[in-house]
Image (cartoon, rainbow, N blue to C red):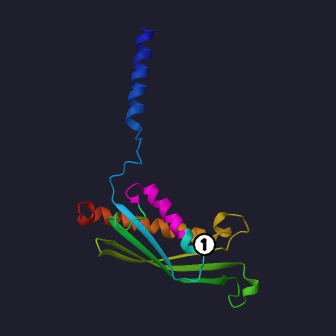
Amino acid sequence: MNKGRIFAFLCVGFCILQSSCRYKIVNHSDRSGKKISLEVRNDSLAQQLGGTLRRALREELLKSSLHRLTDDLQEADLRAVISLSNYSNTPESFSANDSLSAIGFRLNLNATLVLSSGGKTILKENFEVSGSTLGDGSKEPHTRQPNVALARELARRVVFSIDYKSNLDPVIRNP
């Protein structure tokens, strides 16, 4: 009788573990998504933001697992062009006119995403991201590297738009 209870307990435990675990092994090298080419145009005053955004976009696209990156324009099914503009870095303090007593800075950036397939524009979207270095004096990464935080936030939003549009548009899903 004791062996029967142990067996029943193990069976019930296995069933509970099996039904509640939704972990799946994903083969990231075998993506069924379209090939996408990225181009970042930096028309803003932030000199290194273009390269930082390109790296953040590549990381976000690899995480999303819906598209494969390519550098070859002829091979790409989709082409994403992100243009950066209107970067501003304004002081934040009790007196915004006195930049010497600034405690932090407010950063703003505008970006435009143009997604095209076969020479046809299928999505044009404008983004505005902002951030602040104003903080409690801690050494958080967003206060030490605000442009990197801006680039990551913009990359998340751009990749979300690309993924969302490519799931909705039948031209992209089935060319």
> From the viewer's perspective, is residue 63 above or below residue 20?
below
Task: Please state which of residues 152 and 101 is positioned toward the viewer in this rendering.
Answer: 152
Which of the 4 quarters of the picture holds residue 68? bottom left
Position of the N terminus, as image quadrant, is top left
Position of the C terminus, as image quadrant, is bottom left
| Residue 130 x/y as whole percent | 55, 76
Magenta span: predominant SS is: helix
* Residue 54 belongs to the span the image colors magenta: yes
| Residue 29 x/y as whole percent | 41, 48
* Residue 81 belongs to the span the image colors magenta: no
- Residue 75 horizontal side relative to residue 100, left or right: left
| Residue 39 x/y as whole percent | 45, 72
**Label 1: which residue?**
147
> From the viewer's perspective, is residue 131 above or below residue 35?
below
Residue for point 34% across, 67% down: 74
- Residue 97 horizontal side relative to residue 40, left or right: right
Residue for point 43% across, 21% down: 10
Three-letter amino acid code at the position of disc 1: Asn
Residue for point 47% across, 60% down: 60
Task: Please state which of residues 142 and 80 is positioned toward the viewer in this rendering.
Answer: 80
Label 1 CA crowd tier, 10 Å (few <14, some 14–19, many 20+):
many
Task: Please state which of residues 22 and 39 is positioned toward the viewer in this rendering.
Answer: 39
- Residue 4 horizontal side relative to residue 152, left or right: left
Q: Which residues are magenta?
A: 53-69
Residue for point 36% across, 51% down: 31
> From the viewer's perspective, is residue 7 above or below residue 136?
above
All told, the count of numbered labels is 1
Indicate the secondary structure of the residue bearing disc 1: helix
Task: Please state which of residues 53 and 165 is positioned toward the viewer in this rendering.
Answer: 53
| Residue 87 x/y as whole percent | 56, 82
